Image: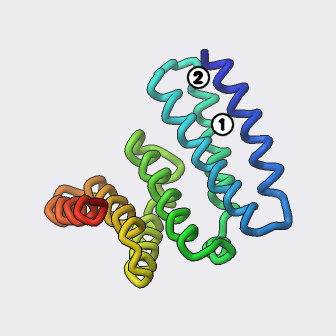
Amino acid sequence: ITEALYSEVNRAANYYQMVADSFDLALSTKAKLALINLFIETKVELEQIALSSESMRIEAIEADAMMAYTSIDSSDFLSLPFIESIYSRLGLAKSLLKVQEKIASSSFNGVLSNVESLIIAATADAESLGNSRALAFAYETLADFYVQKDAANLNFAITRYKEALSLAQ
């Protein structure tokens, strides 16, 4: 199963990379974000299978995800429509949180310090827009971040989860 999974991931990654290499900045940004998510989801899936024989593939996928992440500049989000920029930043933050959740020795550890600022900026934009759905997603993502950060922030996280649920109804 892992060989078939790896083959499909490579095929999908090649398609995303073709779009990421395009001159349309908005499409390129979306493709890069999709590529990061693809690699992170695959990494998580392979780690759940927990085959020691796949450790080299897992490391390679993590390196590919890191390369895709470093190719994104914060100004790339400006090429997207405002609401899409909010969702894209929050989606990226959620993907990065998954990496942190799974292993502490991830090469993404240095990157995770940027996650909080990414979430806070997207939350501020959702608040300024007054979009309840985007704000609910932002509060949920912020709560997820604080749950992972440390136990001292648990009450703040619970408050944000409640606010997210209230906005989503």
Residue 110 in view here: no
Q: Quadrant of residue 33?
A: bottom right
Where is residue 162 drawn, in percent x and y?
A: 19, 61
Residue 132 falls left or right of residue 105 = left
The quadrant in which the C terminus is found is: bottom left
Residue topped by disc 1: 60
Does residue 134 show up? yes
Colouring convention used in this rendered image of the protein: rainbow
Question: From this viewpoint, which residue is outermost toward the front?
Answer: 169
Q: Amino acid at mark 1?
A: Ala
Q: Residue at x 64, y 24 (%)?
A: 5
Rendered position, 2 above or below 58: above
The amino acid on which the numbered mark 2 sits, given as a three-letter code, is Glu
> Residue 58 location in percent, x, y?
58, 32
Which residue is located at x 60 percent, y 15 percent? Answer: 1
- Which residue is pictured at 45% across the width and 64% down the height? 115
